[in-house]
Structure formats: C-alpha cells, structure tokens
Image (cartoon, helix red, strand yellow):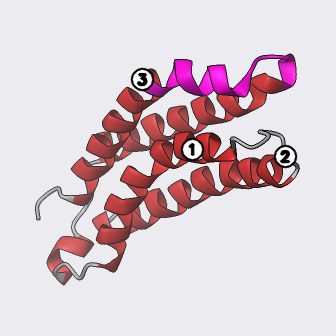
Amino acid sequence: MTRQKAIRTLFVMWLVIAAVPTLIITIQSLSRGYGDDSELAWQWLLGQYTPVISVLLAAVFSEPSTRWKNAPTNLWRFRWAVGISAFQAFAILMVLCLPLAGFSPFLLFEKTQTALSLFQAVAVASVGAVVFDGR
C-alpha cells in the first residue's frame, strides 16, 4: 500500500468515525435529549475527533512529492493507526449508547473525558506517524 492510499484510507475511516456520533448527538440535541445542556455533549464529542481529523485534513490537502506519495507505507504503523482509530470509535459509541441503559450522559461525559483524551492522543500520534513518515 502506498503512503497516499494509507492516508486516504485513514481519512475516510475518520470521516465515518466522526459522522456516526455526530448524527447521534445531532438527533439527541434536536429532540432535546440533553435539555438545555447540549453544548456539553458537543464539547465532549468534538474533543474526541477534531485533533486527528485536523492532522488528516492537512495531509490530504498537502502536496508531497510524487516519490513520497508512491512509496510503500509502513504497514505496522498503518495497522496500529487503524486499530487505535477503531478502538476510539468503539469507545465513543459505547459512551453514547450507555444512556439507553439508564446511565446519565453527563456523568458519562465527565467520567470518560480523561481516558478518551489519552486514547485520542495515541490516535493522533499513530495517524501522525503514518502521515509524517519520511517527510
């Protein structure tokens, strides 16, 4: 797999990762599922994926050399980035689904913020390792 294909794959993956919870929060916000505090849900959610999407947007819209784009990607780094990204997506969805079991969404946002921020840091670093490898 080339570096360019790896970056595009990660970009599409993260667009899907972002789209699903964004749709859930949008529906819950419009249906007043968070009362007057929907901005807390949005702050929590945007903190989960904006850093990695920002790195990927910069990579997708930059113009590296043809030699760099066509070089093979480091598969170990790419697989690690995909794996941590999938885990981050799963964790986000679990937090958004737990209120269906009677848990307070605000308590979940508060209690998961630190752990998910750590996973987000690993995801950003992993995606960055793929994006900046050899640049």
Q: Dot 2, crowdedness within 10 Å: few (<14), some or many (≥20)? A: few
Q: Secondary structure at mark 3?
A: helix
Residue 47 coordinates in the image, percent (x, y): 46, 44
For residue 33, above or below residue 116: below
Region of the chain picked out in magenta, as a range? 100-113
Amino acid at pointer 3: Thr
Say which quadrant the N terminus sits in: bottom left
Residue in view at x 26 percent, y 78 percent: 62
Residue 48 % position (x, y)? 49, 42
Q: Are marks 3 and 2 in contact (CB under 8 Å)?
A: no
* Side of 95 relative to 12 (left or right): right
* Quadrant, the C terminus: bottom left
The quadrant holding residue 119 is top left
Residue 92 drawn at (x, y percent): 60, 35
Q: Which residue is mark 1?
A: 45
Label 1: how many Cα within 10 Å (few below 14, some 14–19, many 20+)? some
Nearer-the-camera pick, 26 or 90: 26
Please identify the quarter of the rendering in which residue 19 is found.
bottom right
Secondary element under disc 2, as helix, strand or loop, is: loop
Q: Indicate which disc, 1 or 2, sits on the residue closer to the N terminus.
A: 2
Look at mark 2 in the image and give the residue it sits on: 32
Q: Amino acid at mark 1?
A: Leu
Q: How far apart are the two marked residues, 1 and 3, measured between alpha carbons? A: 13 Å
User: Residue lying furthest left in this view?
Assistant: 135
**Main secondary structure along the magenta-highlighted residues:** helix
The residue under label 3 is: 114
Q: Amino acid at mark 2?
A: Arg
Closer to the N terminus: mark 1 or mark 3? 1
How far apart are the alpha carbons under marks 1 and 2?
17 Å
Residue beneath the point at 59% across and 28% down: 109
Q: Nearer the viewer, mark 3 or mark 2?
A: 2
